[in-house]
Amino acid sequence: MLNISRPLDRKERFLREIKGSQVIIPDLYALFPGWKFNININYEKVKKQTDIWLESWVENDTLRRRMQIANFPKLAACLYPDALEEECLMMSYYHLWVFLWDDATDIALDYTLGEQPFNGHPPPMAPVMSAFSNVAEKVVVGATTEARQRVLSELKFYVDGACILPLHRNNGKKDFLTVKGFLEQRDASGGVGASVALILYVYHLNIPASVLDHEAMRSIRDQSCMLAHLINDIVSFRKELMDNQIDNIVPILAIENKYSLQQAIDDACRLVWETRRIFEDAEKRVPVPTGNAELDMQIKQYIQGCKDLVSGALNWCYRNERYFGKNPKQEGNKIFLEILP
């Protein structure tokens, strides 16, 4: 159950207090010593094909331009740096689609095909769902039964959480989440679990459930999701504050602990560091060698894929203007921001 408290007037007071303040986003790359930050060599090809695909189903010019600026082909290239061209392209399609679908659920909750499977030709679909079928067809063909089941399970978990979130936001209680409650709903509504499961499709891995369900492998999955969520929150909190939203770990930390926004940023970075350490500790407990050299190699590739997902999310944030603008004030990888100028 979500832990909900705090009256709305505290939010309004908080927004007034931080208006015009200056903060620093520390060098987030430094929180991941020894991790790789690569970009897929197929990026340019994937970008061209994604632009064509986007025009085929997104009619609104403004929305289409916004998606091009966000640069989801680069996101896919950062998240899956070793993927072949087709798999990288499908991940570009998927992450662009999931962003638009998630955006749509803030307005309407009918962008699903229902829980029951259908036989034969699919029923009439809204363009946003038809676009998803382009990705799903490739995943079905290119993934093992185990991988498909995990992707489906993660997608259902995400869709359920994403559909509930706007209802919570509009429930009329004028409340917002505590840190504990926020982290609980973030896991349910963030969608990173599906991106992790798709590693199995992208690299055509055939890892048995007995290995994927080992406590160390489950921890690696969970910490990957948490790291991606925390990174996204740290880089996006200013943009969200400008949209009058505080569903973000940074302002929630500041409000709950009654300290400055800079302290909250630093505390969020501490959470990233600690979560990364938990990930690396879990990596040491993975049950290898298994006695099967091919399986050992695939387990290693899966774990590297989880690391790439985290480092790629960070790399993407620094390589587009979505969060920091075209020419942010920076010193190395430190970013200087003014809040609600």
Image (cartoon, rainbow, N blue to C red):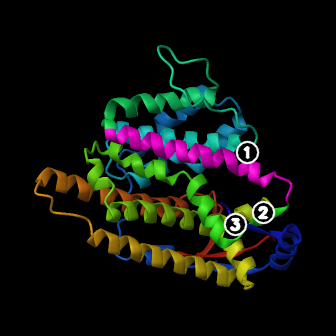
Left or right: 312 as drawn, with respect to 211: right
What mark, if any, has residue 208 been given in the picture? none
Q: As shown in the figure, which amino acid type bears the numbered disc 1?
A: Asp
Distance (Cα) linking label 2 and label 3: 25 Å
Q: Is residue 171 magenta?
A: yes
Q: As shown in the figure, which amino acid type bears the numbered disc 2?
A: Met
Question: Taking 290 as reference, is 250 above or below it?
Answer: below
User: Helix, strand, or loop for circle 1?
Assistant: loop
* CA neighbours of label 1 inside 10 A, class few (<14), some (14 to 19), many (20+): some
Of 335 and 203, nearer the camera is 203
User: Helix, strand, or loop for circle 3?
Assistant: loop
Question: Taking 144 as reference, is 282 above or below it?
Answer: below
Query: What residue is at 42 percent from the left and 39 percent from the top?
Result: 89
Could you tell me what secondary structure mostly forms the magenta stretch?
A: helix
Query: What residue is at 64 percent from the left and 44 percent from the top?
Result: 102
Q: Earlier in the sequence, mark 2 or mark 1?
A: 1
Q: Position of residue 71 (x, y in %)?
A: 55, 48
Quarter of the picture holding the N terminus:
bottom right
Instruction: Give the mark toward the camera: 3 or 1.
Output: 3
Question: Taking 295 as reference, is 220 above or below it?
Answer: below
Q: Position of residue 335 (x, y in %)?
A: 60, 75
Query: What residue range appears in magenta?
Result: 146-173
Q: Earlier in the sequence, mark 3 or mark 1?
A: 3
Distance (Cα) linking label 3 and label 1: 21 Å
Instruction: Give the mark toward the camera: 2 or 1.
Output: 1
Q: Which residue is mark 3?
A: 3
What mark, if any, has residue 106 been given in the picture? 1
